[in-house]
Every structure is written in structure tokens, then in C-alpha cells.
Image (spheres, rainbow, N blue to C red):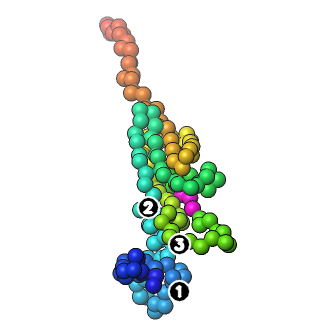
Amino acid sequence: MAGMVFGLENPMMTALQHLLDIPDGESGLAAGEKQGPTRAYVRDARAMVATPTDVKELPGAYAFVVDMPGLGSSDIQVQVEDERVLVISGERRREEKEDAKYLRMERRMGKLMRKFVLPENADMEKISAVCRDGVLTVTVEKLPPPEPKKPKTIQVQSRQWRRLS
């Protein structure tokens, strides 16, 4: 039943559901056998695929515009990992009401995530994030371009030679 989508069995969904049902470290494989991706890896990969993002380069900054529907500012995390990896994540949870029975669920629930390796000219100290109407905008300012090195001028001195007589 887990692999059923609109009444049809979908092998890919069945495989994903099977991976999600196995707790990490309990695959039942003998020592030395190759194990498939972990449940956390599959969950994160699905979250990254399902999080649409626009990346823009502006004259003085980079802008990451991410759709985060139904999430408030407190539900969103913006972090920098490994000095240059921008991680944007959040999780949308199902609204639980005891007296309500879902007849159809089409809105996406679960984890939203994207990772971006920032370029060398990104200023890691000047990152800001603003969420408005379900759209998160993360701005990473650029470092000023290095000033061109000016050639060093060396003054030439003249010396009088003394004759030896």
C-alpha cells in the first residue's frame, strides 16, 4: 500500500518507502556487505529536490530566493557550514486536528533544504535573510575587489666616482 499512487503501484515509491521504514544501522546486512543510502540521506535528497530556488548575481551581492510556503521566520534556518557552504532549511508539519479527517492531501509536508557552495568573493560576515509571504531571500554580499597593486618606484641615485691618483 505504501507504493500506491492514485491506485497504481509505483516501484520507485515502494523502494523509497522501504528505505524510509528501515531505521539507520538496522539494515539486516551481514558485516562487510554494501548498504544502500541511509534514511537521513534519502530524506535530505528528497528535500533538496523539492525546494525551488532562484540564485541571482547582483553588482554587490548574491541573492538566493527560496520558496518556503507555510513557514514562518522561526521555522527557517540559514547556516554556513564548512566555511563556504550555505545551508537553507526548514520543516513544514501537518496541522493536526482531532475532529478533521483528510480526504485528500496535496500540499507538501516535511523538510525543505538547499545547499550552495559560495564563491571565493562572498563575504561570510555579511549574510542577511528576510522572509516575506512564504518567500525567503538570503543576501550574501560580495567582498570588494582587491585593489590592483601599484608598481613600486625606486629612485635612482647618482654617485660621483673618485679618481685614484
Where residue 21 appears, as percent x and y from the top left, is 51, 82
Q: Are marks 1 and 3 in contact (CB under 8 Å)?
A: no
- Whether residue 91 is in magenta: the answer is yes
Residue type highlighted by circle 1: Glu
Q: Nearer the viewer, mark 2 or mark 1?
A: 2
1 or 3: tag closer to the N-terminus: 1
Residue type highlighted by circle 2: Ala
Q: Which residue is mark 1?
A: 26
Viewer can see residue 154: yes
Where residue 10 appears, as percent x and y from the top left, is 36, 79
Q: Nearer the viewer, mark 3 or mark 2?
A: 3
Q: Residue at x 40, y 39 (%)?
A: 57
| Nearer-the-camera pick, 89 or 136 | 136
- Whether residue 18 is in magenta: the answer is no
Q: Secondary structure at mark 1?
A: loop
2 or 1: tag closer to the N-terminus: 1
Q: Which residue is mark 2?
A: 50
Q: Residues within 10 Å of mark 3 (few under 14, many from 20)?
A: few
Where residue 62 appears, as percent x and y from the top left, is 44, 41
Q: Residue at x 38, y 18 (%)?
A: 154
Q: Is residue 101 left or right of residue 64?
A: right
Q: Which residues are magenta?
A: 88-92
3 or 2: tag closer to the N-terminus: 2
Q: Is residue 34 left or right of residue 80?
A: left
Q: Residue at x 44, y 67 (%)?
A: 46
Q: Are marks 3 and 2 in contact (CB under 8 Å)?
A: no
Residue sticking out furthest to the right:
98
Q: Which residue is mark 3?
A: 103
